[in-house]
């Protein structure tokens, strides 16, 4: 059974600081997705990481994937208040015979950026 | 832009009622998913469908069923609602191509009294 563990689950940081969210998973997968969720809203896709060593960056967020270590990181640079949200990682499991995949989500990291 | 819509944003039902949650996507996606989201538990997959009339159980299918009669529409059915099914329900769709993400609807917050 695939298990996905995020840490920390809660993160309070000051504006301007850097921090990293970690996502570990228990079985082999070469695809990982990061999402953002604002309070009362649905999930918005941030990054799709498709291979070992993949790195994607968008603004102050950078995500990477190490499939050998079964670890993905989401690094926040010089945080601003607008980044306050809950961040989820999700690991793909291919559904055999159908060419589709299902996702197993971590529990999410609630990030609060304090001015 | 991909659009995934859900029939209700908020729903209040009584224990024992049959509840239908509808999801429609407009991107001709093969795959559709139903999740529930609970505080501290993240998102958990209830059912998914990779083709019309096809369905697969996810991690927590008990107490739920699904229907997919048309490609764009995926329904979640609570046969006899119970209070422990009070939750946020999220529908998603995807093309199935690995480089594409799953796209989520706005969610239905269901309260079962």
Image (cartoon, coloured by chain):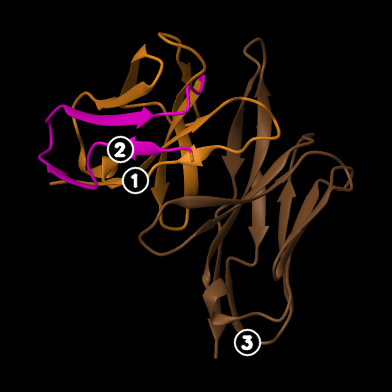
User: In the rendering, what colour is chain B?
Assistant: orange
From the viewer's side, name the closer residue of A60 and B87: A60
User: In the rendering, what colour is chain A?
Assistant: brown
Q: Which residue is mark 1?
A: B107
Which residues fall within the magenta stretch? B2-30
* Residue A56 percent location from the top left of the image: 78, 54
Badge 3 crowding class, 10 Å Cα cut-off, few under 14, some 14 to 19, many 20 or more, is: some
* Residue B93 percent location from the top left of the image: 48, 31
Q: Are marks 1 and 2 in contact (CB under 8 Å)?
A: yes
* Residue B17 percent location from the top left of the image: 11, 30
Q: Is residue B47 left or right of residue B76?
A: right
Q: Have a look at marks 1 and 2 and say if they share a chain.
A: yes
- Residue B72 drawn above or below residue A59: above
Q: Which residue is mark 3?
A: A15
Badge 2 crowding class, 10 Å Cα cut-off, few under 14, some 14 to 19, many 20 or more, is: many
Residue at 61%, 25% in the rendered image: B96
**Disc 1, SS:** loop
How far apart are the alpha carbons under marks 1 and 2? 7 Å
Q: Chain of mark 2?
A: B
Residue at 30%, 37% in the rendered image: B6
Residue A2 seen in the current view: no
Q: Based on the picture, tell me whether residue A40 belongs to the magenta stretch.
A: no
Q: Based on the picture, tell me whether residue B20 belongs to the magenta stretch.
A: yes
């Amino acid at each position: 059974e695939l298990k996905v563990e995020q840490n920390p689950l809660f993160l309070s940081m000051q504006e301007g600081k850097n921090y990293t969210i970690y996502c570990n998973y228990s079985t082999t997968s070469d695809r990982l997705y990061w999402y953002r969720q604002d309070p009362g809203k649905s999930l918005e896709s941030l990054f799709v990481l498709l291979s070992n060593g993949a790195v994607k960056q968008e603004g102050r967020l950078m995500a990477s994937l190490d499939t050998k270590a079964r670890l993905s990181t989401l690094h926040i640079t010089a945080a601003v208040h607008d980044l306050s949200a809950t961040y989820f990682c999700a690991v793909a499991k291919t559904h055999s015979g159908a060419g589709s995949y299902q996702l197993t989500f971590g529990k999410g990291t609630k990030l609060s950026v304090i001015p | 832009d991909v659009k995934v819509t859900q029939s209700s944003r908020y729903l209040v039902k009584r224990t024992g009622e049959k509840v239908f949650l509808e999801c429609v996507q407009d991107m001709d996606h093969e795959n559709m998913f139903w999740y529930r989201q609970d505080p501290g538990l993240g998102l958990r997959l209830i059912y998914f469908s990779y083709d019309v009339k096809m369905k697969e159980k996810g991690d927590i299918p008990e107490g739920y069923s699904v229907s997919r009669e048309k490609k764009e529409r995926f329904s979640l059915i609570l046969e006899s609602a119970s209070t422990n099914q009070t939750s946020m329900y999220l529908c998603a769709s995807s093309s199935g191509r690995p480089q594409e993400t799953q796209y989520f609807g706005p969610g239905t917050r269901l309260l079962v009294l």
